[in-house]
Image: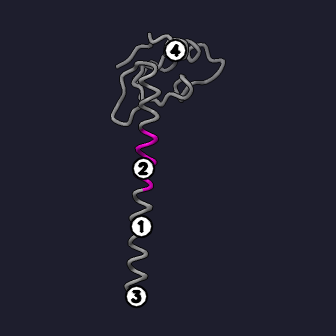
């Protein structure tokens, strides 16, 4: 009986671990796909490598609906950055 419980626990932990890995891979793939659509260089995790206009620093950011995740509506620098990402002319590193 004790072996059955250990086997079930072992299988459960392995399946959870595999599920987490699948979700991480799916997430990284989605980020890379968004960056590829914008034709931007990416880091190892699939985030777009851009130079932030607002803070003048290099950043690796996810793209959400074609905009950097750090995008803040109604901020002129962020608006310009989002337009440049969409046009494919944003500064990268």
Distance from Cα at disc 3 to Cα at disc 4: 59 Å
Q: Residue at x 45, y 33 (%)?
A: 31
List x then y, in percent, for residue 65. Answer: 56, 26
Rendered position, 8 above or below 16: below
Q: Secondary structure at mark 2?
A: helix
Distance of mark 2 from mark 3, alpha carbons? 30 Å
State which tag comes first along the sequence, 2 or 4.
2
Q: Quadrant of residue 14?
A: bottom left
Task: Mark 2 vs mark 4: give the one in front.
Answer: 2
Is 81 rendered above or below residue 9?
above
Task: Compare marks 2 and 3 and give the one earlier in the sequence.
Answer: 3
Question: Which label's residue is closer to the chain start, 1 or 4?
Answer: 1
Mark linked to residue 13: 1
SS for tag 3? helix
Query: Looking at the rendering, in which quadrant would you find the N terminus?
Result: bottom left
Q: Which residue is mark 3?
A: 2
Q: Was residue 1 drawn as part of the magenta stretch in this picture?
A: no
x then y, percent, for residue 21: 40, 51
**How far is the residue under mark 2 from the one under mark 4?**
29 Å
The residue carrying pointer 2 sits among few (fewer than 14), some (14 to 19) or many (20 or more) residues within 10 Å by Cα, namely few
Q: Give residue 22's mark.
A: 2
The x and y percentages for residue 88 are 45, 12
Residue tagged by mark 4? 86
């Amino acid at each position: 009986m004790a072996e059955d419980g250990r086997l079930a626990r072992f299988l459960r932990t392995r399946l959870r671990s595999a599920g987490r890995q699948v979700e991480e891979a799916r997430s990284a793939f989605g980020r890379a796909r968004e960056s590829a659509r914008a034709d931007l260089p990416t880091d190892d995790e699939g985030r777009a490598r851009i130079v932030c206009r607002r803070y003048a620093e290099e950043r690796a950011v996810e793209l959400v609906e074609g905009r950097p995740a750090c995008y803040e509506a109604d901020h002129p620098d962020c608006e310009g950055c989002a337009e440049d990402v969409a046009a494919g002319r944003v500064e990268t590193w």
